Image (spheres, rainbow, N blue to C red):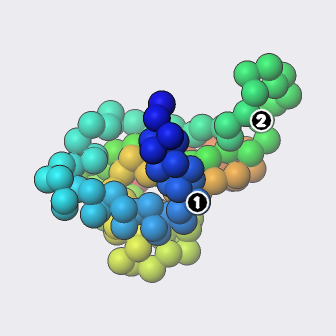
């Protein structure tokens, strides 16, 4: 990759979830695209980035929201608010900008519970 691309990626790594959500909205507005259109209809839990040789069981997980069906948005929004403690506006932006990381570095049990709650809500 070029140095310019590497610098952009490094800058993106420093964004908060709210800033990343605002960035996605701005990109969608500027370029007339819909970031959620490319996502599949699933929700996944991803472990933190690490070496491929790491043989220890992962103890921290990132909770990702890949896509929200339009008819399930309100139920999923309520679950996202309860998981994150965000206000209505911030949670709505997060849900509408899926695919989106909801929480990071969660313990396995909490991540599994959160995944079940999101799936039950329709995510």
Q: Is residue 116 visible?
A: no
**Label 2: how many residues lie within 10 Å, few (<14), some (14-19) or many (20+)?**
few
| Residue 107 at x, y percent in the picture | 75, 50
Give me the residue at 40% from left, 36% from top: 42
| Residue 51 at x, y percent in the picture | 75, 27
* In the displayed structure image, the side of residue 76 where residue 53 appears, left or right: right
First of labels 2, 1 by sequence position: 1
Q: Secondary structure at mark 1?
A: loop
- Would you identify the image quadrant in which residue 97 lies? bottom left
Pick the front one: 2 or 16? 2
Q: Secondary structure at mark 2?
A: loop
| Residue 96 at x, y percent in the picture | 30, 59
Give me the residue at 39% from left, 78% from top: 88
Give me the residue at 39% from left, 47% from top: 99
Which residue is disc 1 drawn over? 14
Give me the residue at 32% from left, 33% from top: 40
Q: Point out the frontmost of discs 2 and 1.
A: 1
- Residue at mark 2 to residue at mark 1: CA–CA distance: 23 Å
Q: Is residue 45 visible?
A: yes
* In the displayed structure image, the side of residue 5 where residue 22 appears, left or right: left
Cβ–Cβ below 8 Å for labels 2 and 1?
A: no
Which residue is disc 2 drawn over? 58
- Would you identify the image quadrant in which residue 53 lies? top right
| Residue 94 at x, y percent in the picture | 39, 62
* In the displayed structure image, the side of residue 62 where residue 68 appears, left or right: left
């Amino acid at each position: 990759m070029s140095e310019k691309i590497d610098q952009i990626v490094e800058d993106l790594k420093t964004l908060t979830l709210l800033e990343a959500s605002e960035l996605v909205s701005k990109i969608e507005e500027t370029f007339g695209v819909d970031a959620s259109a490319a996502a599949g209809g699933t929700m996944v839990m991803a472990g933190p980035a690490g070496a491929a040789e790491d043989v220890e069981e992962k103890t921290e997980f990132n909770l990702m929201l890949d896509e929200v069906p339009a008819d399930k948005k309100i139920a999923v929004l309520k679950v996202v608010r309860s998981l994150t403690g965000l206000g209505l506006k911030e949670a709505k932006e997060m849900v509408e900008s899926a695919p989106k990381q909801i929480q990071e570095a969660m313990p396995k049990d909490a991540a599994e519970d959160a995944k079940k709650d999101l799936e039950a809500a329709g995510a």
